[in-house]
Image: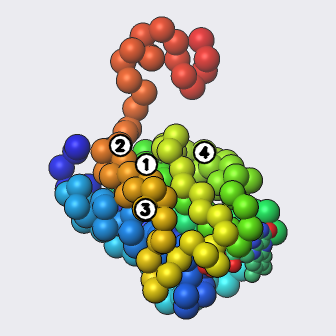
């Protein structure tokens, strides 16, 4: 692990009793146990109007960007909203870009009221790629949210272990800044030559 890894959790639900926030907290606890400093960014505390393309500094956007830029790894968490991820997270991400995310390791977590939230995870993965982040292959989907959490904890131990692993991998793979030599020796991953 690189030294002084800082992991930021960014859950996209504004609900007081959010399962996404609960699971994000658990992943951050695992990251802290693996040696990182951690921070949960609570979007309820940020004034972020819908993004006007001409105004990247509206509301608390500069403060948000500062927190994201300070992280070596970011856990994006979202509830499933209509088969995709939630608008508070989208708005937050729209105030950020490659300046904050390039070279940042990103983990993905989604919580659904219904079944396994694959499209939501895929949509977040696409956005992470668009801003130049390194996204972990491991992702966590939590379905049947009404039964998955009890008293602010995940009920299922296997699922909890998977969330822990996500937190640990964010630490283990933080600081990935370039393609490994084994890859660049055979071809240029940017041009494909
Ligand atoms: C606007 C809205 C749309 C939703 N759409 C879906 C959906 O498409 N599929 C699903 O499984 N659950 C859907 N849900 C349920 C949420 O995914 C579920 O309540 C989840 O636990 C919310 O996460 P949270 O506890 O972190 O707020 C929707 C909820 C809302 C408010």
Residue 105's label in the rendered image is 1
Mark 2 and 1 residues: CB-CB less than 8 Å, in contact?
yes
Label 2 vs label 3, nearer the camera: 3
Q: CA distance from mark 2 to mark 1?
A: 7 Å
Q: Which residue is mark 4?
A: 129
Provide residue 47's location: percent of width, then percent of height. 57, 88
Please, what secondary structure does the residue beneath circle 2 have?
loop
Whether residue 104 is visible to the viewer of this picture, yes or no, is no
Q: Are marks 2 and 3 in contact (CB under 8 Å)?
A: no
- Is label 4 in contact with label 2 (beta carbons under 8 Å)? no
Q: Earlier in the sequence, mark 4 or mark 2?
A: 4
Q: Is residue 180 above or below residue 141?
A: above
Judged left or right of residue 26, residue 32 is left
Residue at 60% x, 85% y: name it: 14
Q: Which mark is residue 157?
A: 3
- Badge 2 density bin: few <14, some 14–19, many ≥20, Cα 10 Å: some
Residue count near mark 3 (Cα–Cα under 10 Å), binned few <14, some 14–19, many ≥20? few
Q: Is mark 1 within 8 Å of ligand 1?
A: no
The x and y percentages for residue 29 are 31, 68
Q: Earlier in the sequence, mark 1 or mark 3?
A: 1
Q: Which residue is mark 2?
A: 173
Residue 166, which numbered label?
none
How many neighbours does mark 1 have within 10 angstroms: few (below 14), some (14-19), or many (20 or more)? many
Please identify, in this view, whether the residue under mark 4 or under mark 2 is nearer the observer: 2
As displayed, is residue 181 above or below residue 53? above
């Amino acid at each position: 692990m690189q030294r002084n890894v800082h992991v930021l959790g960014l859950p996209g639900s504004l609900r007081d009793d959010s399962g996404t926030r609960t699971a994000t907290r658990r992943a951050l606890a695992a990251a802290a146990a693996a040696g990182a400093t951690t921070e949960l960014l609570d979007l309820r505390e940020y004034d972020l109007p819908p993004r006007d393309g001409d105004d990247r500094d509206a509301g608390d956007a500069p403060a948000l960007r500062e927190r994201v830029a300070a992280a070596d790894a970011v856990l994006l968490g979202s509830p499933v909203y209509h088969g995709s991820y939630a608008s508070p997270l989208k708005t937050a991400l729209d105030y950020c870009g490659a300046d904050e995310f390039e070279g940042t390791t990103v983990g993905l977590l989604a919580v659904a009221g219904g079944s396994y939230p694959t499209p939501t995870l895929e949509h977040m993965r696409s956005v992470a790629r668009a801003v130049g982040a390194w996204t972990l292959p491991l992702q966590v989907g939590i379905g049947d949210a009404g039964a998955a959490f009890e008293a602010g904890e995940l009920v299922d131990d296997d699922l909890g272990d998977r969330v822990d692993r996500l937190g640990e991998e964010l630490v283990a793979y933080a600081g990935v800044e370039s393609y490994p030599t084994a890859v660049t020796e055979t071809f240029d991953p940017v041009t494909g030559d």
